[in-house]
């Protein structure tokens, strides 16, 4: 270690620790993608960032768990027979998560995707061993994982609470079935909203526009299809255009919760609509990113 | 052109029997829509520090983009470290460092986190990435500032963060796009000295683009001048400079006799106020003997006799404006 020549305009000295080239083994693209995954999750949750960046994600996640705590409280306080009637089942809890999921989609997804384009980081990724495909897969993975925080995990949390209070599933087979259904439902919801958010964030580099667009799309499509269905003139399948409610409808079919299902629409149509929206979003993202020029 | 005999030390290159140049282009063409950037780009870039010179809009950034595989050439053959960047796998780019032209970096990410992240993406294990990103930031003079968010940094500091992330993963070659853009004169000196050091002491080949001749002249071994879609001049700076310009002879007296003697021996001369420029285009070495003989013949009292060192700027102006 040597101190180099002092800076001519100040007393400061550059402390020189030298440089070592790296000749060791290098990890493949998979590890690089994992690094993007980790960085995205950290960014979205405001980790290693100032306090104000933590508020929205923490508040949203909080909203997702509060009802679960309330239901668990009810289960503790009330006798099992009454509690069983009163507390939400797993399918309807996914419905209760809507607000948290909409907020999360609107404010967290654009943060993960749009900022890379405005910050120049996307260009630096493209100059690295990663290509567009690697990048998008890593981003998608991080978003689905983040979505689990407000879809899958709250319901698993609820399940654990119910089981502790003896109103959960009985026996191993039952438990496995319920856990499986919850995981499938979490995936249905997470993939759908992650892709929807990615599509919106692909169309604009402005985070604000993407957030506003997502909220307007989810709420607007719900109101529009609701009005049309209520008026009685529209066919039942119009209700599937309620994008915020569509994955929930698919989930009710996973749990066979017929009460919450859209009347007059078959499971096939519901799942088809879900897959169709996902496919359109994938197309928007892939096409948008393929066209995106990295000039600088 | 001078070739370095040092063997290339990475696996990617071993497989293609050690090419003499780190970058080679043969008849590369590229256009954006109807705008043609390169029509016929042919050049060999040897090891060492190479300056890529051209006026704004001459395609320097496009060339760097093609070397990174971001853009595909329309035609011709382009190679970096012996591989075709448009079709090579990710392993090639693990050995290339890149510092973009823009100063935009993620605002609220600490410099150290950013540099480590880029190093990990280039294949370094986490522990190595952490130590080397820290070393790189110390090297560029941001050791004390490494935990600071990039958004709070000045342009000079951002340029240094960009340089740090380009070298932290131990690349074989770094591509620097206008690395001194936005720096004040003192920062520019520091940056150029650092780049020179990276190219010599650390043995990383450097290709830096610039529209400023003076800085390339100061630190580069070789220069590539691009203009009008093609390479106007390329080679070691010393050769490009001394290979032309002739010899200046200055005598205390009998200047007119000397001039006519030189003219009669078939040399092209240009009489200036108190000196004679001999052989305006030929290489200096061949002329000196002839001039000495002429001076002896007319018995002129010789004051000075020296080859004209053409500055890169003159070369640049000649090459770009004669185009």
Image: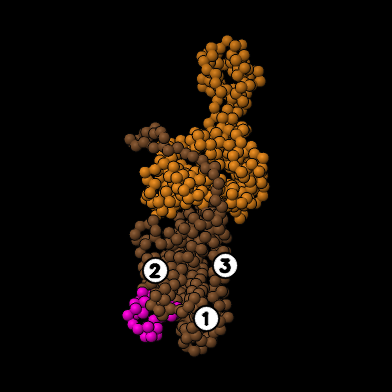
What stretch of residues is rendered in magenta? A68-93
Q: Residue at x 42, y 66 (%)?
A: A107
For the rendered model, the colour scheme is by chain
Whether residue B114 is visible, yes or no, is yes
Q: Please identify the quadrant where the N terminus of chain B is shown.
A: top right
- Residue ID for mark 1: A253
- The reply to whether label 1 and label 2 mark residues of one chain is yes
Closer to the camera in the image, A104 or B180: A104
| B18 in relation to B241, above or below | below
**B45 relative position to A97: left or right:** right
Q: Nearer the viewer, residue B39 or B178?
A: B178
Find out whether residue A75 is within the magenta segment.
yes
Name the chain under label 3.
A
Mark 1–mark 3 Cα distance, whole angstroms, equals 26 Å
- Label 1 close to label 2 by CB (< 8 Å): no
The tint chain B carries is orange
Marker disc for residue A283: 3
Q: Secondary structure at mark 1?
A: helix
**Residue beneath label 2, please?**
A61
What residue is drawn where x is 63% and y is 19%? B263
Check if mark 2 and mark 3 are on a common chain.
yes
Residue at 47 percent across and 86 percent down: it is A259
Q: Earlier in the sequence, mark 1 or mark 3?
A: 1
Residue furthest to the bottom: A232
Q: Please tell me which of labels 1 and 2 falls first in the chain.
A: 2
**Which of label 1 and label 3 is nearer to you?**
1
């Amino acid at each position: 270690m040597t101190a180099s020549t002092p800076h001519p305009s100040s007393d400061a000295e550059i402390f020189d620790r030298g440089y070592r080239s790296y000749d060791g083994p290098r990890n493949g693209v998979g590890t690089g993608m994992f690094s993007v995954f980790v960085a995205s999750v950290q960014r979205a949750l405001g980790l290693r960032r100032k306090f104000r960046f933590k508020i929205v994600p923490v508040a949203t996640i909080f909203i997702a768990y509060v009802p679960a705590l309330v239901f668990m409280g009810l289960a503790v306080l009330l006798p099992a027979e009454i509690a069983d009637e009163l507390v939400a089942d797993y399918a309807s809890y996914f419905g209760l998560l809507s607000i948290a999921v909409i907020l999360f989609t609107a404010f967290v997804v654009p943060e993960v995707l749009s900022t890379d384009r405005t910050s120049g980081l996307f260009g630096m990724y493209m100059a690295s061993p990663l290509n567009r495909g690697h990048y998008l897969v890593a981003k998608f993975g991080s978003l689905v994982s983040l979505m689990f925080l407000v879809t899958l995990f709250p319901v698993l949390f609820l399940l654990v609470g119910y089981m502790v209070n003896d109103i959960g599933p009985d026996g191993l087979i039952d438990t496995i079935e319920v856990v499986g259904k919850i995981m499938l439902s979490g995936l249905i919801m997470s993939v759908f909203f992650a892709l929807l958010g990615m599509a919106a964030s692909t169309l604009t580099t402005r985070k604000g526009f993407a957030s506003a667009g997502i909220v307007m799309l989810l709420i607007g499509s719900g109101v529009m299809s609701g009005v049309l269905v209520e008026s009685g003139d529209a066919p039942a399948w119009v209700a599937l255009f309620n994008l915020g409610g569509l994955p929930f409808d698919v989930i009710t079919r996973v749990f066979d919760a017929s009460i919450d299902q859209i009347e007059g629409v078959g499971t096939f149509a519901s799942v088809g609509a879900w897959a169709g929206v996902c496919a359109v979003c994938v197309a928007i993202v892939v096409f948008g990113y393929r066209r995106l020029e990295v000039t600088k | 052109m001078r070739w370095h005999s040092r063997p290339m030390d990475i696996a990617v290159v071993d497989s293609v029997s050690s090419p003499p140049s780190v970058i080679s282009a043969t008849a590369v063409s590229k256009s954006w829509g109807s705008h043609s950037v390169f029509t016929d780009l042919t050049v060999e870039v040897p090891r060492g520090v190479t300056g890529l010179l051209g006026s704004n809009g001459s395609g320097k950034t496009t060339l760097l983009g093609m070397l990174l595989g971001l853009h595909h050439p329309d035609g011709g053959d382009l190679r970096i470290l012996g591989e075709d960047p448009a079709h090579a796998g990710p392993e090639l780019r693990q050995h290339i460092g890149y510092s973009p032209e823009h100063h935009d970096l993620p605002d609220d990410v600490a410099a150290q986190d950013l540099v480590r992240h880029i190093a990990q993406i280039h294949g370094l294990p986490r522990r190595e990435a952490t130590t080397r990103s820290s070393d790189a930031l110390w090297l560029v003079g941001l050791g004390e500032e490494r935990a600071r968010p990039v958004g709070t940094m000045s342009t000079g500091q951002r340029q240094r963060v960009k340089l740090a992330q380009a070298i932290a993963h131990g690349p074989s070659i770094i591509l620097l796009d206008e690395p001194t853009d936005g720096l004040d004169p003192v920062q520019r000196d520091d940056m150029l000295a650092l780049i020179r050091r990276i190219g010599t002491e650390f043995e990383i080949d450097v290709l830096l683009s610039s529209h400023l001749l003076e800085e390339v002249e100061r630190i580069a071994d070789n220069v590539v001048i691009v203009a009008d879609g093609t390479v106007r001049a390329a080679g070691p700076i010393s050769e490009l400079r001394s290979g032309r310009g002739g010899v200046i002879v200055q005598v205390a007296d009998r200047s007119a006799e000397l001039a006519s003697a030189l003219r009669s021996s078939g040399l092209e001369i240009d009489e200036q106020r108190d000196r004679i420029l001999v052989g305006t285009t030929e290489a200096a070495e061949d002329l000196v003997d002839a001039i000495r003989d002429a001076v002896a013949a007319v018995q002129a009292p010789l004051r000075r006799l020296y080859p004209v060192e053409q500055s890169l700027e003159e070369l640049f102006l000649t090459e770009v404006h004669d185009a």
